[in-house]
């Protein structure tokens, strides 16, 4: 008997739904597997894991605070550098350049995103860190030491070096989202601003930046998510020592870098489990920041 | 009058800042490219492509095993991710308004935000632990999770570019919807979908973190799916943090090859995708 | 309503079309005679395209859209629950406003894809159908040497004739045309009007057009729609020379619409 076309369609429809459910289930499954593997550490240490300052696998001491500190401080510095740069570059592309030139610049910015993290790491080790040690660090020490963040010797690698590379890496993320938001702004709004006698800067402030503020913040949060999870370049440039130091020249370690460094060598169950605990924390931090970015955009589009 | 001058100055100052920002983005790009191409090119030799590593201390050798390993594992990942990803892309483009598809879209966004190192740990727990060995398979699984959201997103976008009236024309011929979707919409978009897949591959090929404790790496040629396998990114990492000058040179050469591979794929895919979007599909 | 000399092939009975809460077509009843050309005219947004799309059940494919009423094809209601919608559409073909050949398919494949996907794979049969349909669509001479090039590589007018050939290939007794020449230049339009006279020998055509001259030139019967209602229906010769309704007269004399 020939099936009715509606029945045939239903077969495809439900096949597609089942596969889609599978993919959704995969995300939940990742969460579940990480939680399960982290459970010994969670049940043993609980919250004290997060505030513990000692990380000593030999003594079975696991406190994650140095890594959380390292992750947050590098991401934070990277954002401080990358946010204004990304917004200005997005403005450059969408408001200042003629269409054909802007395409090339936009492509170049996106190219930065295509460069693998490992290549940034390699470049950081052999180019940026000598430059940091010999030029940038002495300069900062000489003129900005009053801030109090640039103390002690720089070995080239450390928090600042890692943050700078991170900043370069997240610019494309933030700027491409900003650009797509700026391009949504209707032309008549810009013209209305010009009609009031604005300079280009005033027009951009009034008609482009202000109405895009929530979109921009969502882009920044997405950039943050990217920076928090970035592994290789940071691992190669941060110096990997679990300390909480005041100077930006000093080495540190991030959640991602300690996983990359220690996971294959971890041989006590608690060590492995603690690393999974870190992975779970990192998973949730990025998860929440992405959700936050999404909800900002959602509210933003509702306002419009 | 004074005020007008002030506004003008502010305007120029702002433009100066914009130019400065553009320089801050483009200069590192050119520095990285220059560094990799100059150092890499000078370290490159024919034996890099034809030989496997020599024992520590001996000069020479190459990364043939890692180049082939990268291709092997990336294709393995694609083999898992493409069918799943394209299927979800079809679901989102053809039935995009249901509750499930909204959940799927959120999942895709969240999945693309998972740090790749975490995906590596997941693949370790899922594949390496039960099989009791690092393996190419584990690497493939890890890369497939990285590719999946990219493939879903691009597939959805590409299929959505097919105008509604093409679907209606298919239905008007008395074809059931599933045939219209599979044999007209999907078949008509195959080459475009391929572009999306290339984009995903270019992203996965450069990943190091998820391979560290899945495919792991080795120093010889291997095609065995259940054994450790070398890849370019991991090999570059191993050599880059080593103290040997010759290995560091090999790392540069490896970075050069990896960059050429990835940028070619990536720029090609991007070029084609913007062309497709300009033409609005047809 | 006006009398029809021909045997009735398709009949709409109190057809209503809805988009959610919005009613686009309001209670249309009209009968179409076999092998006639029937034009539907009216100001834009008057529901004429929507009405046409109820006749092959394409309207219901739009999200939230539904139809009430009956459409009888040779006496059988196509909205009957027991009827499979694909069988309806096999017998009522459609040509759209914008030429829409299938992407990435050759000219030949575009014509025969309907048959092929119904399981007819014999090459000689497909070639025969392709040739005869392309001839009926007055396209054969222009494409017979490049049947394997892409359908989308043709000019707009050629693409539209290709779409007509594609619709004819499954041999539907009724052919719906939704402003088929509105996207075309005058020469391409003339070509399509010409071939419609040929098509009329074997098929019943219902054509929506915003071009009154076109309706007058090619159709046997004309219906005039305003705001989802049919104001008048009759022989085209009557409608265009001696309309009964004031609104029709205003419209065709260009005072309204």
Image (cartoon, rainbow, N blue to C red):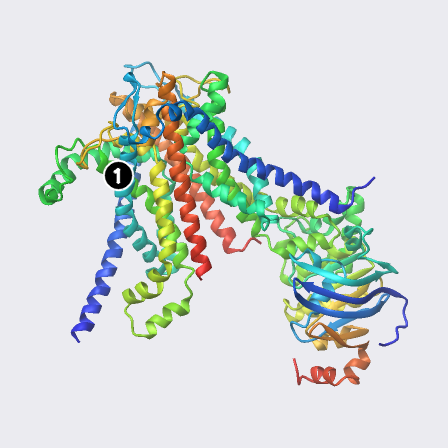
C219 lies above or below A104: below
Q: Residue at x 18, y 36 (%)?
A: A246
Quadrant in the rendering for residue C76: bottom right
Instruction: Identify the residue at image location x=70%, y=40%.
Output: A11
Query: Is C248 above or below relative to B46?
Result: below
Q: Position of residue C219 (x, y in %)?
A: 79, 73
- Residue A155 in the image: above or below residue C225: above
Chain for mark 1? Answer: A
- The x and y percentages for residue C1 are 84, 76
Q: Nearest the camera: A126 or C22?
A: C22
Q: Position of residue B37 (x, y in %)?
A: 31, 36
- Badge 1 is on which residue? A73
Visible in this render: residue B208? no
In x, y percent, where is residue B114? 42, 37
The answer to whether residue B76 of the structure is visible from this angle is yes
Along the horizontal axis of the image, is A154 left or right of C72? left
């Amino acid at each position: 008997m020939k099936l009715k076309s509606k029945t045939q369609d239903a077969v495809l429809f439900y096949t597609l739904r089942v596969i889609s459910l599978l993919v959704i289930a995969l995300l939940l499954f990742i969460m579940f597997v990480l939680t399960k593997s982290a459970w010994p550490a969670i049940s043993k240490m609980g919250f004290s894991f997060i505030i513990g300052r000692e990380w000593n696998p030999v003594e079975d001491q696991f406190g994650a605070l140095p890594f959380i500190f390292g992750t947050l401080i590098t991401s934070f510095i990277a954002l401080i550098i990358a946010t204004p740069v990304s917004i200005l570059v997005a403005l450059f592309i969408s408001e200042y350049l003629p269409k054909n030139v802007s395409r090339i610049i936009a492509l170049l910015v996106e190219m930065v995103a295509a460069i693998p993290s490992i290549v940034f790491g390699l470049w950081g080790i052999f180019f940026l860190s000598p430059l940091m040690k010999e030029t940038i660090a002495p300069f900062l020490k000489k003129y900005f030491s009053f801030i109090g963040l640039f103390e002690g010797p720089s070995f080239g690698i450390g928090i600042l070096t890692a943050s700078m590379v991170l900043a370069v890496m997240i610019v494309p993320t933030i700027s491409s989202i900003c650009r797509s938001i700026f391009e949504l702004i209707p032309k008549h709004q810009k013209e209305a601003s010009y009609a009031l006698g604005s300079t280009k800067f005033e027009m951009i402030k009034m008609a482009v930046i202000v109405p895009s503020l929530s979109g921009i913040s969502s882009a920044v949060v997405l950039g943050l998510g990217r920076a928090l999870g970035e592994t290789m370049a940071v691992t190669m440039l941060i110096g990997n020592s679990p300390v909480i130091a005041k100077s930006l020249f000093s080495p540190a370690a991030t959640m991602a870098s300690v996983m990359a460094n220690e996971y294959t060598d971890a041989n006590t169950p608690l060590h492995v489990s603690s690393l999974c605990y870190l992975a779970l924390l990192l998973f949730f931090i990025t998860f929440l920041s992405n959700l936050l970015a999404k909800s900002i955009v959602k509210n933003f589009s509702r306002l419009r | 009058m004074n005020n007008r001058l002030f506004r003008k100055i502010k305007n120029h100052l702002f433009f100066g800042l914009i130019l400065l920002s553009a320089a801050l983005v483009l200069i590192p790009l050119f520095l990285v490219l220059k560094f990799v191409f100059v150092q890499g090119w000078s370290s490159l030799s024919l034996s890099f492509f034809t030989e496997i590593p020599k024992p520590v201390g001996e000069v020479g050798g190459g990364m043939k095993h890692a180049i082939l390993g990268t291709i092997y594992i990336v294709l393995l990942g694609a083999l898992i991710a493409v069918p799943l990803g394209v299927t979800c892309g079809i679901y989102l483009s053809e039935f995009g308004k249901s509750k499930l598809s909204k959940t799927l879209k959120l999942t895709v966004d969240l999945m693309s935000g998972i740090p790749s190192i975490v995906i590596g740990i997941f693949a370790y727990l899922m594949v390496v632990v039960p099989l009791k060995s690092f393996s190419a398979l584990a690497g493939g699984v890890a890369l497939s999770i990285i590719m999946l959201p990219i493939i879903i997103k691009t597939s959805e976008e590409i299929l959505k570019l097919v105008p509604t009236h093409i679907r209606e024309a298919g239905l008007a011929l008395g074809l059931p919807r599933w045939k219209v979707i599979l044999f007209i919409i999907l078949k008509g978009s195959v080459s475009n979908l391929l572009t999306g897949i290339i984009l995903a591959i270019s992203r996965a090929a450069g990943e190091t973190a998820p391979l560290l404790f899945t495919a792991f790496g080795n120093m010889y040629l291997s095609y065995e799916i259940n054994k450790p396998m070398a890849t370019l990114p991991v090999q570059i990492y191993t050599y880059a943090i080593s103290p040997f000058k010759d290995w560091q040179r090999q790392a540069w050469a490896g970075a050069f090859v990896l960059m050429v591979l990835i940028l070619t794929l990536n720029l090609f895919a991007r070029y084609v995708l913007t062309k497709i979007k300009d033409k609005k599909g047809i | 309503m006006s009398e029809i000399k021909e045997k009735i092939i398709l009949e709409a009975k109190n057809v209503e079309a809805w988009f959610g809460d919005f009613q686009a077509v309001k209670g249309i009843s009209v009968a179409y005679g076999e092998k006639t050309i029937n034009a539907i005219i009216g100001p834009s947004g008057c529901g004429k395209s929507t009405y046409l799309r109820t006749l092959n059940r394409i309207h219901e494919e739009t999200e939230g859209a539904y139809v009430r009423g009956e459409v009888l094809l040779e006496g059988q209601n196509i909205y009957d629950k027991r009827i499979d919608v694909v069988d309806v559409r096999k017998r009522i073909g459609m040509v759209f406003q914008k030429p829409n050949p299938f992407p990435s398919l050759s000219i030949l494949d575009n014509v025969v894809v309907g048959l092929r996907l119904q399981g007819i794979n014999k090459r000689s049969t497909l070639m025969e159908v392709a040739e005869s349909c392309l001839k009926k669509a007055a396209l054969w001479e222009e494409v017979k040497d490049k049947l394997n090039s892409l359908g989308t590589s043709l000019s707009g007018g050629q693409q539209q004739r290709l779409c007509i050939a594609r619709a004819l290939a499954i041999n539907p007794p009724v052919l719906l045309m939704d402003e088929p020449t509105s996207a075309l230049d005058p020469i391409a339009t003339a070509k399509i009007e010409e071939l419609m006279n040929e098509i009329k020998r074997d098929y019943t055509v219902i054509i929506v057009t915003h071009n009154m001259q076109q309706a007058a030139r090619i159709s046997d019967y004309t219906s005039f729609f305003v705001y989802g209602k049919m104001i008048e229906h009759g022989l085209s010769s009557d409608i265009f020379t001696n309309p009964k309704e004031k609104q029709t007269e205003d419209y065709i004399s260009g005072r309204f619409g």
